[in-house]
Amino acid sequence: MSETLNIPNRRLTDIQEVSYFGDQNKPSPHPFFCHDASMTQQSARDSAMASERQYPNADIEAPSVLPPEERVRAIGWFFSLRDQIVDALQQVEDEAEKTPAYAPFRLAQRAQFVYRTWQRATKSSDSSPSTKNKAGGGVAASLRGVAIEKAGVNISVVGGTLDQGFQKEVKGGNAAEFFAAGISVVVHFRSPHVPALHFNTRLVATDSCWYGGVCDINPPLPSADGSATFHRMLRHAYAPSDEELYRRHVAECDAYFRLPHRGNATRGEGGVFFDHLDVTSSGSTTSNPDRLTDAPDRLTDAPDRLTDAFPDRLTDAFPDRLTADADNETAEGTTDGFDLVQRLGTCFVQYLPDHVHAITRAWTQEEEDAMLHYRGRYAEFNLLYDRGTRFGLKTGANPDALLMSLPPRAVW
């Protein structure tokens, strides 16, 4: 039996149990709860259709194992994080576009994020109101800019029934009913000196409920400091008591992003990957715990750049980051799953300004060619092996939103 959460048209700030870091007094539109006029301020070609846009309804049935309050705070956080990431990327684009390196690529009008909504597809035979209530949909925010060649920041909140043939591939899929909400971010920069970024966190429920996520870096060219600052940022997101969990997630990321048809080559320079992270405890049920010993010590070679890269940003956001946070620990001493997802997202936002430190550096044609070849490998993984792509295709997601992770240009 499923419970239904009925949320009227309200702003996120009206909903209890939702918190996020940053300026909490700043109003932020959240189209899953309301149709805000500020969301319609887009390019001229979109303004005509803005008044007709119907955002997905948050009143989506979910398996009863998922507490309604957990769904509320997860969805609220995903939209809050979406706004923060969009703002940060828009600022990067606006500032970098003014520099000489991008003069050949400047557009007639300022590049801005464009928002489009989609409804999850349902079978033609399943047209009853109850079935539509389960379907859900999403909001896709995309940017085609000058310095940021392509970025996608997508939200999806869907529910329904898993196809019988796909049930065995999903944890708890024997229950058939499912609910999934999440945010997915991919950024491809025009400069080969700025690595592509991939970030995704999600809440899933079948006959159990859990969080999953990934944050990884994909430099097309070897960087002088490797990806040291990026990995230090990720370690910063984990509680001090979660050292083992952090290393396990690093190992899972290294094991996941591989191309078997390319000699088991890795995609990118790693990050963290986790799935089946319990809603109330960070006890991970990853497939192969022994891979923990294969996790490289990515912090060993990292210079002490954390405080230099983030003078006050991270310490202000997480004043308790260097000490265990007792309020967010369970009886077993493990961090709350939502807490990890929230902290990882906030660290990602705070990291973005430092990530693009080389964005105005000039590049050669040879370096661009190397980037395009690397993008080909990136696309191969997403099309052949990515679990999120497969899950979306099997559950009726919008294909344009689902495949937004593909680079705008690539060669083989």
Image (cartoon, rainbow, N blue to C red):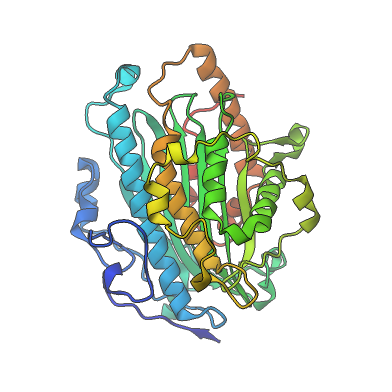
Q: Is residue 198 visible?
A: yes
57, 293: nearer the viewer: 293
308, 70: nearer the viewer: 308
Q: Is residue 132 visible?
A: no
Which corner quadrant holds the C terminus?
Answer: top right
Which corner quadrant holds the N terminus?
Answer: bottom right
Image height of 273 relative to 20, above or below: above
What is the quadrant of residue 308 in the picture?
A: top left
Q: How many marks?
A: 0
What residue sits 26% from the left and 59% below the top?
28
What residue sits 46% from the left and 48% below the top?
348
232, 73: nearer the viewer: 232
What is the quadrant of residue 296 in the picture?
A: top right
347, 91: nearer the viewer: 347
What is the quadrant of residue 262 in the picture?
A: top right
How far from the left and from the top, in percent, is residue 182? Answer: 48, 60
What residue sits 30% from the left and 38% below the top?
91
123 horizontally vs 50: left or right: right
387 horizontally vs 34: left or right: right
How far from the left and from the top, in percent, is residue 181? Answer: 48, 64
Image height of 115 relative to 110, above or below: below
Image height of 82 relative to 178, above or below: above
43 horizontally vs 211: left or right: left
Residue sitting farthest toward the front: 323
How far from the left and from the top, in percent, is residue 211? Answer: 57, 65
131 horizontally vs 379: left or right: left
Image height of 61 relative to 121, above or below: below
Residue sitting farthest toward the bottom: 1
